[in-house]
């Protein structure tokens, strides 16, 4: 029988376990790069949402969550941030990104931001 390496138990105990509720990511708007970025409390990049401006329309084209952070609400937090900003500045949204389009479908308060031909 092998002896466990000192400190391993502590590392395992502190690692997130399935079902743990982790803190919400911090989402920041990186206007210069056309991205919303999500970071954890340690400042580690968790994901990004890419967009471009077309007049008064925000065109979202990708939402990416790094594999180790999937399932923790990262993409939802970024979608909410871009849509809340669109409301605040009176923009419309062209959700070319499938994730943002589905987020809008699931959250009726954002449906008024989209083009009428979407049928939301």
Image (cartoon, helix red, strand yellow):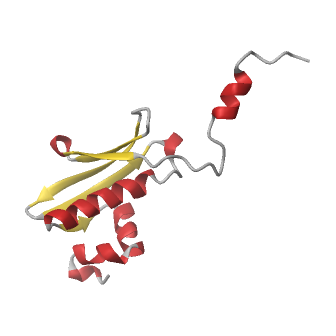
Residue at 58% x, 50% y is 21
Above or below, 53 relative to 16: below
Residue at 36% x, 52% y is 63
- Which image quarter: residue 82? bottom left
Residue at 39% x, 73% y is 107
Q: Position of residue 4 (x, y in %)?
A: 80, 18
Tell me the quarter of the image containing the C terminus. Answer: bottom left
Q: Residue furthest left?
A: 55
Q: Is residue 6 left or right of residue 111?
A: right
Above or below, 45 relative to 110: above
How many numbered dots are placed on residues in this image?
0
Q: Nearer the viewer, residue 43 or 100?
A: 43
Tell me the quarter of the image containing the N terminus. Answer: top right
Q: Position of residue 87 (x, y in %)?
A: 21, 67
Q: Is residue 46 left or right of residue 17?
A: left
Q: Position of residue 100 (x, y in %)?
A: 35, 63
């Amino acid at each position: 029988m092998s002896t466990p390496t000192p400190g391993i138990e502590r590392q395992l105990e502190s690692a997130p376990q399935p079902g743990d509720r982790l803190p919400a990511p911090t989402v920041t708007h990186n206007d210069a790069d056309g991205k919303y970025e999500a970071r954890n409390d340690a400042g580690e990049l968790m994901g990004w949402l890419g967009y471009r401006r077309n007049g008064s329309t925000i065109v979202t084209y990708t939402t990416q969550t790094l594999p180790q952070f999937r399932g923790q609400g990262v993409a939802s937090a970024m979608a909410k941030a871009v849509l809340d900003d669109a409301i605040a500045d009176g923009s419309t949204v062209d959700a070319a990104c499938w994730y943002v389009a589905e987020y809008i479908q699931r959250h009726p308060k954002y449906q008024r931001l989209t083009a009428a031909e979407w049928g939301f």
